[in-house]
Image (tube, coloured by chain):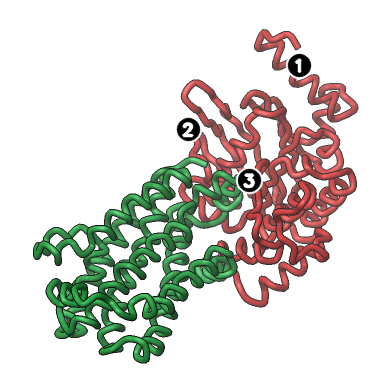
Chain colours: A green, B red
Amino acid sequence: MTAFLRQEVRTLLRTRRTKIIAVVICYALLVFPIAMKRPPQSMVDLAGEWFDGDGSFTLFMFAYLDLSMNKVSMFAGIILVGGIVADERARGELPLLWSKPITRSRYFLVRLTGAVGVFAGIYITATLIGTVYYPSQVSGFDPAIYLGMATVHLFAAGYAVTLAGTMGVLLGRKIPAMLVSLLLLGTFVGVAFLPFYTDSPWLGWLNPFYHGVSLIGQMTTFTPADMLAPIAALLAFHIATAALGAWKVSREEQ
Amino acid sequence: MTPAIDIRGLTKQYKDVRAVDDVTFSVAPGEVFGFVGHNGAGKTTTIQMLLGLLRPTAGSARVLGRDVVADSLAVRRISGFLPASYALPRDMTPVTFLAYVASMFGLSGKPVRNKIDELLTMFDLGKVAKKKLGGFSSGMTQKVGLAQALINDPQVLFLDEPSTALDPIGRADLMRHLATLARDKGVTVLFSTHILSDIEDASQRVAILHHGRLLAAGDLAELKAAHGTPRMDDLYLTLVRGAMAREGITP
């Protein structure tokens, strides 16, 4: 199946929607320091109070994860795979594609994995650009902390792709699936920092995007070992969600 | 000789409708076999069962010795298939689409690129190889559809109404290709159609289906002789009218 996965990635990289997502993520990344140039002192103080570390860099990371990457990932996931399988069905392509020596669930999983992989590639590239660009733009910027937090957040951002793709096959129709994905992801993203504001970590246990940003609570002290728990939780979300989609698609008639 | 396709008592029941009813016939290796019936006769359902895309309600079928239910992926690996109704991805070109289909068979690299070149030449698609499929006519689309069915060098080819969208030249070319594949490469071809002249051009043996039931199967010349009908369309009409009379339907 590696040949199919490679071909799927190649196909996705050629699409207009992938190029748009890459441009939007890079744009968000590059203009962000300009928007965050002179934040009000009250916000800097609040960030220091809610989270961990020096106020200005903490505020930057909070705003970067919440306003920039969380929101962009949410839309990127929906745009990238919102109509997976449903689109092909509506266009009449499935009778041909599903007649090949691949199970329907594997077809779905390969396509989903390809989309997550493409999204991860864009995200990683953007993060590496940030690592080079931000030190000159953000006071107190620490590349190691930034990379560590972005590494964990990558799994949450990628979850937007997994969820949107799964919704496509669960609901079977593109527009309703995209709307439900938007609603769910919007809710997850909207309350991702709630456990910090209320000092109640359990409020985030079932929210992948909380796990994605959870290191902000120990920004100055986390070690690589601290990254493992949120990554493991996020992988479990990915696997459970994708398995649900694979199960649904395996039961479908043409 | 072991048949390439061996169907025994194949049946598909959908709630109140029996789409395929106790169908039995076989196709020899390297044969171009005609599968005839009106729209809704059960041809597509039978072909989908042969590829493991639909599960039979009763009966069994084997393709080159592989059971179509227990070993459906193996059947599809050695088969090529062109559905009766399908669309191609509008944003892909013939080259990218054929590479995409090849990858679903686990094929990639230079052999695939050579195969794609061969198929583009075979179906006269060289000039449009890098144009988006979205702008293709139905005849051109059908040629790409036929090319994708051959991307894996199949040993058995299932073509469901392959000539419907083709113009007379395209149809003649298709029949020539099928004969060449069977003669030179030993490919077994089962193609369904309701265009009776295609059957006479391409097949020595046929199966005729009507309302899911097999009316006749065997050597076309022998069937015509047995029913005193000189042409395929006379044979078909004689058999179908006989079946309708037995069902109490006035033709």
Residue at 82% in and 25% down: B235
Q: Earlier in the sequence, mark 3 or mark 2?
A: 3
- Horizontally, residue B183 falls left or right of residue A176, namely right
Residue A62 placed where, x, y %? 25, 73
Three-letter amino acid code at the position of disc 1: Arg
- In this orientation, which residue lies closer to the viewer: A165 or A41? A41
3 vs 1, front mark: 1
Q: CA distance from mark 3 to mark 1?
A: 28 Å
Looking at the image, residue B28 lies above or below residue A26: above
- The residue at which mark 2 appears reads as B57
Chain under disc 2: B
Three-letter amino acid code at the position of disc 2: Thr
Residue B24 placed where, x, y %? 61, 33
Three-letter amino acid code at the position of disc 3: Ile
Residue at 75% in and 63% down: B131
Q: Is residue A111 visible?
A: yes
Q: CA distance from mark 3 to mark 2?
A: 19 Å
- In this orientation, which residue lies closer to the viewer: B113 or A8? A8
Residue at 53% in and 23% down: B17
- The residue at which mark 3 appears reads as B5
* Mark 1: few/some/many CA within 10 Å (<14, 14-19, 20+): some
For mark 2, give the secondary structure. Answer: loop
Residue at 37% in and 52% down: A182
Looking at the image, residue B187 lies above or below residue B107: above
* Mark 2: few/some/many CA within 10 Å (<14, 14-19, 20+): some
Q: Earlier in the sequence, mark 3 or mark 1?
A: 3
Mark 3 in CB contact with mark 2 (< 8 angstroms): no
Residue B213 placed where, x, y %? 63, 25
Chain under disc 3: B
Mark 2 in CB contact with mark 1 (< 8 angstroms): no
Mark 3 in CB contact with mark 1 (< 8 angstroms): no
- The residue at which mark 1 appears reads as B241
